[in-house]
């Protein structure tokens, strides 16, 4: 009985030791995990702070735009390239061009439609279709003597306003293309590194005598010119 008692005591102590070791391992694992989480969190906080600091410390005077990004922005939305390049003063120029060309196209299209209808009315034999009379001057009447001349007048005006309408449309495309080219070129030129030491030095100089080969005589014979002069040496530093 005594032996069994000692065996139970030894087994109980062993179980307690195992539980103590397991609890200690669990506690160490939790502590290490918490430390890893804190380290990761601190790293993310430091990275975010660095990004915020870099964003706040950006010097717009030395900022260089990307030409490709400026071009694609201008393609997607007219004027966006100029905004990206921080050239806001160009926006009224391009948008004014768009608005002016759109208004010209609308007005010429309306005039073309009116003169086209007037030309159709003057060419038929129906006396009830006389929309062309609204374009006549006060007191002017169309009769057999001047019918052919007015037919030609309405035909030319119809064709003229149609041509002007088409030209207005192509002008809109031209303004759009110009805005894209301007955004790309402006961004490209901003990347040119021009030194602050930009100067032009002028100083007097003497032109030394030169020698030339006389091709009309024996080979290798040289003719020396003793004429010398005074000139200006120019040095451009950039």
Image (spheres, rainbow, N blue to C red):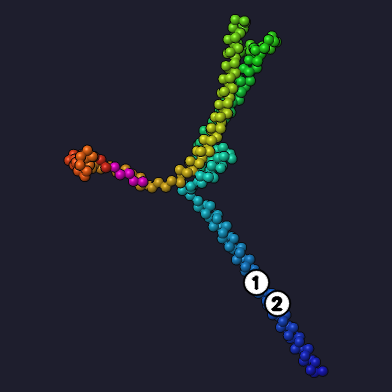
Which residue has dot 2 on it? 23
Determine whether, in the image, residue 22 is placed left or right of residue 175. Answer: right
Work out whether 90 lies above or below 17.
Answer: above
User: Furthest-bottom residue in view?
Assistant: 2
Residue 125 is at least partly visible in this image: yes
Please, what is the dominant secondary structure of the magenta stretch?
strand
Please report the residue visible at 57 percent of the width from the left and 16 percent of the height from the top: 156
Q: Residue at x 67, y 12 (%)?
A: 124
Total marks shown come to 2
Which circle's residue, 2 or 1, is located before the other in the chain? 2
The residue identified by callout 1 is 31
Badge 2: how crowded within 10 Å, few (<14), some, or many (20+)? few
**Residue 70, percent from left and from top:** 53, 43
Residue extending furthest toward the right: 1
In this rendering, the answer to whether 179 lies above or below 220 is: above
Q: Residue furthest left?
A: 226
What segment carries the magenta color? Answer: 234-238
Residue 210 can be seen, yes or no: no
The percent position of residue 224, horizontal first and vertical second, equals 18, 42
Was residue 237 drawn as part of the magenta stretch in this picture? yes
Magenta span contains residue 67: no
- Residue shown at 58% from the left, 62% from the top: 43
Q: Residue at x 48, y 41 (%)?
A: 185
Assign a secondary structure to mark 1.
helix
In the image, residue 223 sits, relative to residue 38, either above or below, namely above
Q: Quick one: 174 or 30, which is closer to the camera?
A: 174
Q: Is residue 60 left or right of residue 196?
A: right
């Amino acid at each position: 009985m005594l032996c069994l008692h000692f065996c139970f005591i030894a087994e109980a102590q062993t179980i307690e030791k195992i539980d103590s070791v397991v609890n200690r391992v669990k506690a160490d694992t939790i502590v290490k995990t918490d430390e890893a989480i804190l380290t990761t969190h601190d790293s993310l906080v430091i990275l975010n702070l660095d990004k915020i600091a870099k964003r706040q410390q950006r010097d717009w005077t030395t900022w260089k735009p990307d030409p490709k990004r400026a071009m694609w922005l201008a393609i997607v939305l007219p004027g966006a390239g100029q905004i990206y390049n921080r050239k806001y003063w160009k926006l009224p120029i391009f948008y004014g061009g768009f608005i002016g060309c759109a208004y010209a196209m609308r007005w010429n299209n309306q005039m073309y439609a009116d003169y086209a209808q007037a030309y159709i009315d003057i060419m038929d034999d129906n006396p009830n279709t006389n929309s062309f009379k609204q374009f006549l001057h006060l007191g002017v009447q169309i009769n057999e003597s001047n019918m052919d001349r007015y037919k030609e007048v309405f035909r030319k005006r119809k064709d003229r306003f149609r041509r002007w309408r088409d030209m207005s449309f192509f002008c809109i495309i031209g303004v759009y293309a110009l805005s894209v080219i301007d955004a790309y070129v402006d961004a490209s030129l901003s990347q040119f590194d021009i030194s602050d030491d930009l100067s032009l030095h002028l100083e007097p100089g003497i032109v030394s005598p030169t020698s030339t080969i006389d091709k009309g005589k024996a080979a290798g014979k040289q003719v020396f010119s003793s004429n010398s002069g005074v000139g200006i040496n120019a040095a451009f530093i950039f």
